[in-house]
Amino acid sequence: MNNFLRIFNLIFKVNRVSIIMILLMLTIFIFGAVKSDIFSHNAQAQTAAKISTEMPAFDIGHPLMSTKGTAEDSSRSIPILWWIAPFGAICGLFFAMKFYRGVMKFPEGNEKMISIAMHVRKGAYAYLKQQYKVIGIFIVGAFLVLLFISYGLKLQSTVVPFAFLSSAFLSGFAGFLGMKTATNASARTAEGARKSLNQGLQIAFRSGAVMGLVVVGMGLLDISLWFFVFRKFTNFTLLDMAMMLPCFGIGASSQALFARVGGGIFTKAADVGADLVGKIEAGIPEDDPRNPATIADNVGDNVGDVAGMGADLYESYYNSMLACAALAITAGLGIAGMVVPMILAGVGIILSIIGIYTVKTKEEATQKELLKALGKGVNISSILILITSAIVIKFMLPQNFGVWGSIFTGLIAGIIIGKGTEYYTSSNYSPTKGIAGHAKTGPATVIIDGIATGMKSTIIPVVTISVAILLSFGFAGGFANTSLGLYGIAIAAVSMLSTLGITLATDAYGPIADNAGGNAEMSGLEPYVRERTDALDALGNTTAATGKGFAIGSAALTAMALIASFVEQVKIGLERAGTHVIQVAGINIDIAKATLADLMASMNITLINPKVLVGLFIGGLISFVFCALTMKAVGRAAGSMVEEVRRQFREIPGIMEGKNPPDYAACVSISTKGAQREMILPSVLALLTPIATGLILGVPGIVGLLAGSLTTGFLLAVFMANAGGAWDNAKKYIEGGAFGGKGSDAHKAAVVGDTVGDPFKDTSGPSLNILLKLMSVVSVVFAGITLKYSEQISAFLHLN
């Protein structure tokens, strides 16, 4: 017994945060299930009489409200292959823990390296603590609003408020674990690079893999748990689940937006301040310990590019599966179609783990060889998922094998977008070298060519996504049955994200390598160590840009699937509100038999409807206003940082001589306060716009809004992410010795371009991914509000 207690105390001491968080999540899950009466079959039966006489417009809290049942519903069975999903999720979390422990076994270096890493770690924890306080206030408020809509107005499922809590909590928890790993890995990566390039790569990449596997493991486990409970312990029909599931992602989407916007403002305020005063005015190298903003810059890499990116892709991963599962039911694919995205995700996690183990490189590897090493793992996982997905579809959907063509399309589209992004942002190719060449004539031409390169870089992603939408729609049989085609688009998004475990690892690797280079510079390690960390860092810039392109591509397909889910929600909502017949061109059609085209025609969702056109304009406008708000936020926060760095250089004697250390904490505090203050308005705008548009312009306005934001936001996100990545690597190309190298006039011009590109690629551009999906999810959740009140408001405003 004593031995057991000693072991328990040790486990709790090491993992107390994780254990407390998991227990809290389980408490939320159980409490939500109980409060929603989903375990009470008797209570549901007793409400049947009341429901038959008083049917709210959108209440799906009670399964007896379903308009039809199936043999699948009555059997409550779960396909045997579904168990791959929870098994894969558990495998992902197990190997995440294994990789974390493996990384922690490596030495952290000398005392100075440990001290610098500790400063970064404390700064990152301090920022996340403040951010989670702000998000916590929002979550409590949003939870109360959802409770009112569900229990008061009865316009949403009574399960949704609790699913909102679980997805928001797990998204934030995944970001915390990823950042914890990253801040522990930077010094170890630098120390590993002292021994060999391959060891530095292995430590950084395995640390990134922790982030990747935690995101996919927690996301899939959350969905699997809800699905299992609904299927085995409730009377919810498949149609009930199709109505509820797309709403569950609002928690993850909200968490992602705050994490992305706040983290992006923090990191770029610090980065811009450090570059403008340190590099240009003081003429000191990047990550020089004399620069007061250098610790804040390294903290920003973790909170923005690790926790922020993790929350972003968690949301895409989560929402793509939910939208696909819901569309399966409306497409008539039943329980088999519903579980296919979960099975693919589970298989993808296992294959991602295999791919992670294949990543290694030789000593003195070139940039292309390092890229090839990371690409090898991704390619192996992608090839294996193609083969295994064919088997899954053959067993689960033998009559709809064309769906495998949609899966193939999604995977290939993701690879093409990644390669296109690599071409336009890597210093191995002509676009980035061309920007570097313009640095010889000053910063103006660098900025002009960078903007032009970013605009041109939209060609490959837009053409790829357009072709992918058509092919995935067609392969699934969409030209004969629209609902099947929409399922094909949704499954393409799932397949693009199926190997997220390894693709996110390659992305999270970047900021870890960047921090390792900063640690090596500040610690005064040997020049060859800095050369190795610079090589890893340059690779990280390219993988980060590729990851951003991948995130944007998956966001476009996911948003498209969520728009389809919104229209399906409207159709079912009308049916349950008592509308059994719709009129199309003067002909009455039973709504149960109506196609999506019939529904769109009956609601006048056409381009000649001014409500749709106004919605399109508002959707396009929101993307630009959102970017303006976030970029201005970076500018204001960076201005405060510049003044603080200048003040320290001016007032603290001996900084430039290395006699007195700067006040790093003051700069971290400025970035933290600026990020918390500035992230509120853009986030609130994204949440309220679809609600206001729906109430004023109705369903046609919402469809226009979502379509406008998708097209404009996608183009803008690609342009900003790629332009910023190209400017960054053009600067690094010059620092490698081209056009005079570090300290030259060309280098100073390139630093200006990189500074302009910082908020492009790390704040505004990536945040647009979440904007697209969040507005779609909010529209789905508040579809009942739109249906019930938009007609009255339109009549009041004389818009009918």
Image (cartoon, rainbow, N blue to C red):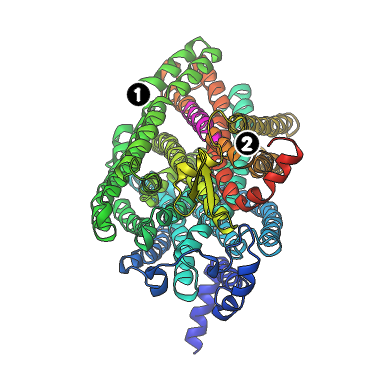
In magenta stretch: residue 719: yes
Name which residue lies at 56% across and 28% down: 608
User: Looking at the rendering, in which quadrant would you find the C terminus?
Assistant: top right
Q: Find numbered disc 1 in the image and state the secondary structure of the residue it sits on.
A: loop
Q: Is residue 360 visible?
A: no
Q: Nearer the viewer, residue 218 or 55?
A: 55
Name which residue lies at 65% across and 54% down: 132
Name which residue lies at 39% across and 32% down: 466
Q: Picture coordinates of residue 443 (x, y %)?
A: 55, 15
Does 213 appear above or below 729? Answer: below
Q: Picture coordinates of residue 799 (x, y %)?
A: 70, 35
In the image, taking residue 159 as reference, residue 92 lies left or right, namely left
| Earlier-in-chain disc, 1 versus 2 | 2
Q: Nearer the viewer, residue 545 or 795?
A: 795
In the image, taking residue 33 as reference, residue 387 lies left or right, namely left
Say which residue label 1 marks.
Answer: 429
What numbered label is drawn on residue 270? 2
> Badge 1: how crowded within 10 Å, few (<14), some, or many (20+)?
few
Residue interval drawn in magenta: 709-725
Name which residue lies at 54% across and 70% down: 64
Q: Nearer the viewer, residue 189 or 753?
A: 753
Instruction: Identify the amino acid type marked 2.
Output: Ala
Q: Picture coordinates of residue 266 (x, y %)?
A: 63, 40
In magenta stretch: residue 521: no
> Badge 2: how crowded within 10 Å, few (<14), some, or many (20+)?
many
In the image, taking residue 725 as reference, residue 417 lies left or right, namely left
| Separation of residues labelled 1 and 2 (CA atoms) | 29 Å
